[in-house]
Amino acid sequence: MPFQKISVQKWTIRACDIWDNQWLLLTCGDYSKNEFNAMTVGWGSFGIMWQRPFAQVVVRPTRFTFEFMEKYDNFTLCAFPAKYHKTLQFLGSKSGRDRNKIAESGLTPRASENVETPGYEEAELIVECKKIYWDDFKPERFLDTGIERLYPKKDYHRVYFGEIVTILKAE
């Protein structure tokens, strides 16, 4: 699919809808080495931090993608048309630790413009990011005690901020 580069200043999305209903595919690694993994994410944000456009994602340390997020300094977030919802469910529920789930998904990785991590030909949106910050969620800092119930295994997320360096939208 041909893509058009758009500036972050002209980029408009329905942020809550894209995270909550459409989901995004978080990928991290190196396309040229064929060493990357992906997982579906439904929690995160977009905005401005430290005078830079950013995407913020969270990854539990138990996820295989966590290893890639720790090793590489960039990641991509991709949105897909509704017909890929089942593919995203698959990618969010199966581990790439013991299988090539990206190949099984039928998606076609493609080289990114400014990061080593790939995007996907089938995506309608590719957001390329370079990591600029991380931190671990600390349960003693949850102000809403109901949040703790989302962590029955005590596997608190690590949060990553990535500076948005490129946005590509399907034409």
Image (tube, helix red, strand yellow):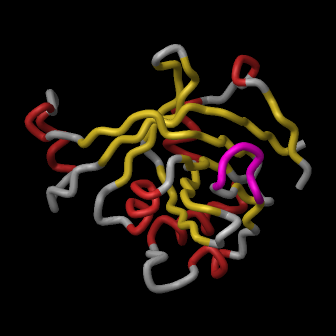
* In-front residue for pair 31/8: 31
Q: Residue at x 51, y 47 (%)?
A: 73
Residue 14: % across, % down = 62, 29
Among the 4 quarters of the image, the one containing residue 60: bottom left
Residue 147 left/right relative to 70? left
> What span is in magenta?
111-116
Q: Residue at x 44, y 42 (%)?
A: 57
Residue 105 left/right relative to 81? left
Q: Residue at x 76, y 19 (%)?
A: 10
Residue 110: % across, % down = 77, 61
Among the 4 quarters of the image, the one containing residue 91: bottom right
Q: Residue at x 48, y 52 (%)?
A: 41
Please tell me how many numbered marks the rendered image carries: 0
Among the 4 quarters of the image, the one containing residue 126: top right
* In-front residue for pair 78/75: 75
Residue 50 left/right relative to 23? left
Residue 15: % across, % down = 56, 31
Is most of the magenta stretch helix, strand or loop? Answer: loop
Above or below, 163 against 158 in this view is: above
